[in-house]
Amino acid sequence: MNPQAPPSPHYKWIALSNTTLGILMATINSSIVLIALPDIFRGIHLNPLGPGNSSYLLWMIMGFLVATAVLVVSFGRVGDIYGRVRMFTFGFAIFTLFSLLLSITWMHGGAGALWMIVMRVGQGVGGAFLFANSSAILTDAFPHNQRGLALGVNTVAGIAGSFIGLVLGGVLGPVSWRLVFLVSVPVGLFGTLWSWRRLDPPISRILSKIALASASSSSVSASTYHEPPRGSATLTTPVSSMITCWVRSAISAACSLGSASVSSRALVCSELVPPSTAASASMPVRTTLL
């Protein structure tokens, strides 16, 4: 999409559908492994309840959630700096990549479990990008009287994904534990391409606001400018007008300082001269003619 073009009227619905898909995919993957854990550990030939293996079980469950919870605020700030749409698309791509790497795990035992834990943390990084920037994109896209609707739909998708993941894990796990992670790859690819092609970059709105502000300032300047009458000695150039304002300000400041100094001298004289002397000095002097 051309970043110079104004947003289309349907852009807000495109943003809502894309961000809802991202939130749904992320929340599904946060819970999809819970029911499928026995099949996953059976596939990598590891007993999670064996001596020294309980940490693998805990981090397989918590790795995604810990990474998302720790990074979501920082990635929200990164989206403010480098662009929310750009970071949202980047999160889609990261999530898809680590989902693919999880599905092609070739190691077994403790090495396979460590590989999957690291990949789950990578999924959490992508999920943090999605969570941090989806609400901001919707806030930018929707007018103030429809933001509640958009954020509500986004929240419903997150809640629904939490229990849809449990169902998908229970269905796909017995078929193949790799499908538990592979199911997110086509959704992630579609979401990445859709976000990259269809979501309008925020630069278009920034440029339109700058153009509007420039036009407003130009109209204000044109309306406040008055051409002086012919033959007058008034300076008409902007630089000359500035010089004239500076000169007038200097003259006003000098006059103020002069009046202040006169007042201060009068106050000092009134303090130094005794009242009787001042009264006698103020009495009129009578002269007699001889």
Image: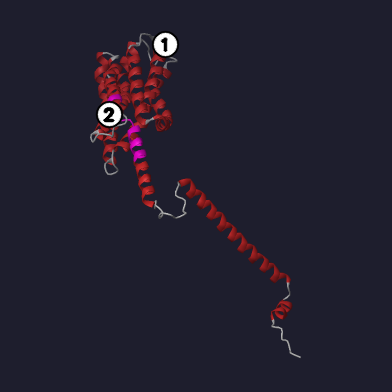
In the rendered image, the quadrant that contains the C terminus is bottom right
Confirm whether residue 261 shows in the render: yes
Left or right: 69 as drawn, with respect to 270: left
Left or right: 11 as drawn, with respect to 285: left
Give residue 146's quadrant in the image.
top left
User: Tag 2: Cα neighbours inside 10 Å, few (<14), some, or many (≥20)?
Assistant: many
Residue 88: assigned label: none
Q: Of the residues shown, which amino acid type is indicated by label 1?
A: Ala
Structural distance between the alpha carbons of marks 1 and 2: 36 Å
- x%, y% of residue 104? 33, 11
Confirm whether residue 202 shows in the render: no
**Element under label 1?**
helix
Residue at the location (53% across, 55% down)?
Answer: 248
In the rendered image, the quadrant that contains the N terminus is top left
- x%, y% of residue 48? 38, 16
- The residue that disc 1 covers is 111
Main secondary structure along the magenta-highlighted residues:
helix
Left or right: 29 as drawn, with respect to 10: right
Residue 18: assigned label: 2
